[in-house]
C-alpha cells in the first residue's frame, strides 16, 4: 500500500513478458528510500531505474513495472545470498561439533 515502510512486503501487479494487459502477482519488498512505487513521480522512477543501470525510457506504467521487477530481483538475490550464508554457518557449526566430539572420544580412549 501507499504507507508501506522500509522492509514491508506487499503484493504488486506487474505485466509479464511485455504482454499488454497481462499481469502476475509478484511479491515486492520496498527497500530503504523506496516508498510505494505506484505512487512515485516519473522523475523519481527514472532516477531509481538509472541508479540500477536500467532504461529510464518509456511511459509511466512501463517505468513502474520495470522498477518493480528490478526490486523483486534484488530482494530475491539478497534472500539467496542470506540463505547461502546461513547454510555455510550451519555447516561450520556442525563440523565444529563433530571435531569436539571426536576430540572427547580420543581423550576417553586414552
Image: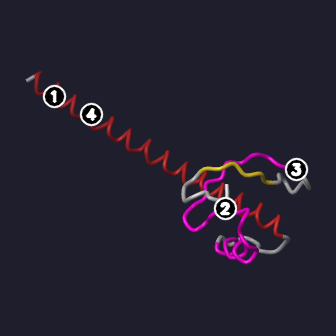
Horizontally, is 27 left or right of 22 in the view? left
Point out which mark residue 97 bears.
4
Residue beneath the point at 24% across and 34% down: 99
In the structure shown, which secondary structural element does the residue marked by tag 2 occupy?
loop
Horizontally, is 104 left or right of 36 in the view? left
Front disc: 2 or 3: 2
78, 31: nearer the viewer: 31
Residue 42: in magenta span? yes
> Can you name the residue that lies furthest to the front here?
3
Residue beneath the point at 60% across and 50% down: 9
The residue indicated by pointer 3 is: 22
Q: Position of residue 52 (x, y in %)?
A: 65, 70
Q: CA distance from mark 2 to mark 4?
A: 46 Å
The residue indicated by pointer 2 is: 36
Residue 72: in magenta span? no
Front disc: 4 or 1: 4
Q: CA distance from mark 4 to mark 3?
A: 52 Å
Q: Of callouts 4 and 1, which one flags the residue occurring earlier in the amino acid sequence? A: 4
Front disc: 4 or 3: 3
Q: Position of residue 1 (x, y in %)?
A: 67, 54
The residue indicated by pointer 1 is: 104
Q: Position of residue 28 (x, y in %)?
A: 65, 53
Q: CA distance from mark 1 to mark 3?
A: 62 Å
Q: Provide the residue span drawn in magenta.
A: 23-51
Placement of the C terminus among the 4 image quadrants = top left
Amino acid at each position: 500500500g501507499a504507507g508501506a515502510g522500509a522492509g514491508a512486503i506487499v503484493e504488486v501487479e506487474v505485466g509479464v513478458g511485455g504482454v499488454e494487459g497481462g499481469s502476475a502477482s509478484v511479491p515486492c519488498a520496498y527497500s530503504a528510500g523506496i516508498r510505494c512505487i505506484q505512487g512515485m513521480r516519473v522523475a523519481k522512477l527514472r532516477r531509481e531505474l538509472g541508479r540500477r543501470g536500467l532504461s529510464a525510457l518509456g511511459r509511466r506504467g512501463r517505468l513502474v513495472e520495470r522498477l518493480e521487477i528490478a526490486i523483486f530481483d534484488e530482494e530475491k538475490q539478497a534472500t539467496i545470498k542470506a540463505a547461502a550464508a546461513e547454510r555455510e554457518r550451519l555447516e561450520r557449526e556442525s563440523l565444529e561439533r563433530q571435531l569436539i566430539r571426536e576430540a572427547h572420544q580420543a581423550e576417553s580412549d586414552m
